[in-house]
Image: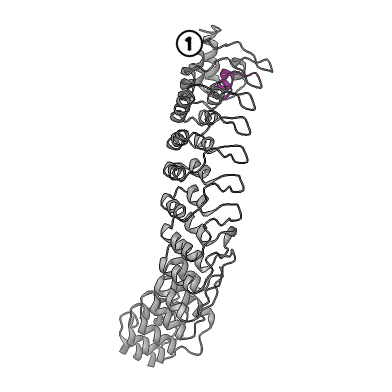
Amino acid sequence: MAAVEDNWRLAELLLQSGATVDARNNHNQTALFHAVAGGNEKTVTVLLNAGAKVDYDVINEAIKHTQESILHLLLANAKGALSEEVLGPALFSAVKQNQHAMVTVLTDSGANVNVCDKRGYTPLLLSAELGHTEVFRVLLAKQAKINATLSDLSSALHLAVHSGSVPIVQTLLEKGLDPNITGPKAQNPLHLAAQCNRCDLVGVLVKAGAQVNAVAQDGLTPLHLASQHNHADTVIQLLQNKAESGLKDRQGRTALHWAASSHGGSRVVDLLLSAKADPTPTDHEKKSALHLAAVAGNLKAVNSLLSRKAKGDAKDMDGSTALHHAASGGHASVVSALLRSLNKKGIEERNAWRKTPLHAAAEKGHDSVAVLLLEAGAKLNTTDHSKDTPLHCAARGGHQEVVKRLVNWGQAGQRKGNLKATNNVGKTPLQVAESGDSPEHETVATLLKRKMFLIK
C-alpha cells in the first residue's frame, strides 16, 4: 500500500521495522513494481536504497509508463550488472513501444544494440518493421548494424519498405544498403514495394539503383506483383520507370495476365493496355489474358481486352475458349459480352472433352447462362466425348432449374431436347438422374418422368 500510494515515509518505516523489500503479492508483483507503475519516484528511491531487486518486469513497467527518470534510477541502482537476459528484452520492449528516449537510456546503460531475440530480430530490424523512425535513428547513432537479416533473408530495407517508412528507407539507402538486396523468395525491396502498394517508395528505390525488371524466384517482376494485387498507382509508377509489361513469369504469365485474373483489376488492365501491353500472349496452359478474365468474371477487363483485339475464339491447352470458362463460372455478363464480340460464332466450339459452352453451363447448374446460350442458338442435343447432351450434364449434377429450362426450351427452327438420348454407357438423362443419391437428383428424376409421361 505504501508503494501504491507513494507514501515513502511509511515505506521507510515498514522497512526499518523488518518488512521484506522484495516480498510479492498474489500477482507476483513487488512493492518496487507498484511504485514504478505509479510513477512514485521517492518511494522507488527508498526501495532501491533498501536493496530492492531490479528485474525485467520492473524495468518494463517504467518503459510502459514513459518514466524516464525512474528508469535512470533503476539502472543506476541495480544490484550488480544487469544481464543481457534483462536488458535485451527491455530494449525490444522500448523499441516496440516507440520510446526513443528509453532506448537511449537503455543503450547508454549497457544494453547490446545488436542483440537478437528468439525470432532473429535485432532492435534495428524491429524498428524498421514497425516504422518507428526516431527509435531507428537512435539505434543507428548507437552503431546498430544495418546489414543484419532475418532467417528468411529479410533485411532492414525489406522491413522498412513493408512498413512504408520513407525516412527509414531513405536513411538505409544513404548508409549504403544495396537497393537490390535479395530477400524472401529472391525478392528485392522493389518487389515488396510493388506487392504492398508502396507507390511512394518505387521512385526512391529506382533512383537509388533498384532494378525495375528484377526477377524473383518465381519469375515475378515488380510489375507482375503490382498487377496481381491490382495496385494501380504502383503500376503507374513502375511503368513510368520503364518496367516492361511483356516479361513472363515461370507460369508464362505477363503482368496483363495477372491484372485480368484479378477481381476488380480492370483499371490496371487499362493502364497496361495503354502502355502497349500485348493482349495475345499465352501462358504455359495456353491461356491468354482474356481466358483468365473470363475465369474471374472480370467484365470490365473482358471488354477492355476485346476492344484491343484480344482473340475471343482462342483455345487453351484443354481446347476451351473464353466462352467455355465464362459459362462454366456462371458469369452471365461476360458470356453476353463474348457472344456480342463473336457475333454468336464459337457457340458450338468444343474443348478437349468435346464439350460446348452449353455443356459447361449445364454441368455447373448456371441457368441464366444457359438461357443466353440457347437464345444465341446453342444446340440442345450436341454430344460430348461421353455422348452426354447438356441435359445429361444437368441431370448428373441435380440441377433442377437447368433441366427444366432444357426440356421446356423451344424456339422456331430449333430442335427440342431429346429426352431419350443415350450416352456411351447407354443411359438416358432420366437414368443418369436416378443414379444420383441426393434430394435434388430425385426432384430432377420426377421432373423428367413427368415430361416423358411416365407419371402424372
Q: Type of residue at label 1?
A: Gly
Please state if 162 lies on the left or on the right of 120 as rendered. left
Q: Position of residue 269 (x, y in %)?
A: 45, 42
Closest to the observer, 109 or 41 = 109
Q: Position of residue 416 (x, y in %)?
A: 53, 10
Q: Position of residue 44 (x, y in %)?
A: 37, 86
Q: Is residue 388 magenta?
A: yes
- From this view, report whether residue 436 is shown above or below residue 452: below
* Label 1 crowd bin: few (<14), some (14–19), many (20+), radius 10 Å: some
What number of labels is visible? 1
Q: Which residue is mark 1?
A: 410
Res 337 quadrant in image: top left
**What residue do we see at 42% from left, 36% from top?**
300
Tag 1 secondary structure: loop
- From this view, report whether residue 124 is shown above or below residue 73: above
- From this view, report whether residue 79 is shown above or below residue 289: below
Q: Is residue 293 visible?
A: yes
Magenta residues: mostly which secondary structure?
helix
Q: Is residue 206 magenta?
A: no
Q: Position of residue 56 (x, y in %)?
A: 47, 78
- The colour scheme is one colour
- From this view, report whether residue 295 is shown above or below residue 235: above
Q: Which residues fall within the magenta stretch? A: 387-397
Quadrant where the N terminus sits is bottom left
**What residue do we see at 53% from left, 25% from top?**
361
